Image: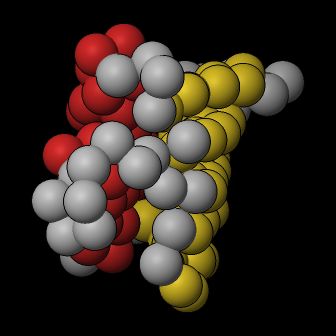
Amino acid sequence: MIEIDAAFDEAGLLRSCTVRGHAYAGAAGRDIVCAAVSILAGTAFRTLAEQEGIQLRGGAAERGRFCMETRYSPEGKDFLKGAGAFLINGLQSVSELYPEYCTLRIQRRK
């Protein structure tokens, strides 16, 4: 099972996303659920890393584990809002299509 925890701040901006586990929905290297989650998380990380006004910490330290923490300045706020929404909507789609292999928990911080 893939477990995803995401946290947003009071402004609705992504502050962290942690992905743990494997879906085991298919053979190694052919698991569509793992592939979808990996591509979404990795692409979000790479895209945010290139953006002015956004600082990232984390990455994929090992297979089956990904962590991203964000900090932003005013010039990165709008981009982070859009990128965070895209990432979470994508991950939510995967968890809704494959609930037996992937769960998503979203926390709103104050």
Q: Quadrant of residue 80?
A: top left
Q: Residue 78: horizontal and vertical position, in percent?
A: 32, 38
Say if 102 sits above or below 46 in the image. above
The residue sitting at 20% across, 69% down in the picture is 29
How many marks on residues? Answer: 0
Residue occupying the point 47% across, 78% down? 63
The residue depicted at 58 percent of the width and 57 percent of the height is: 21
Which residue extends farthest front? 27
Q: Would you identify the image quadrant in which residue 81 lies? A: top left
Assign the C terminus to one quadrant of the image: top right
* Image quarter (top left, top right, bottom left or bottom right) of the N terminus: top right
| Residue sticking out furthest to the right | 110
Camera sees residue 98: yes
Q: How is the image coloured?
A: secondary structure
Left or right side of 101 for 5 = right
Q: Residue at x 49, y 55 (%)?
A: 22
Q: Name the one closer to the observer, 76 or 64.
A: 64
Snapshot quadrant of residue 50: bottom left
Asked if residue 79 can be seen in this view, the reply is no
Could you tell whether 78 is left or right of 106 in the image? left
> What is the x, y in percent for residue 86?
26, 33
Q: Position of residue 31 (x, y in %)?
A: 23, 53
Say if 12 sits above or below 79 in the image: above
Vertical position of residue 97 compared to residue 39: above or below: above
Residue 12, image x and y in percent?
55, 24
Q: Horizontally, is 66 left or right of 31 in the view?
A: right
| Left or right for 66, reference 107 | left
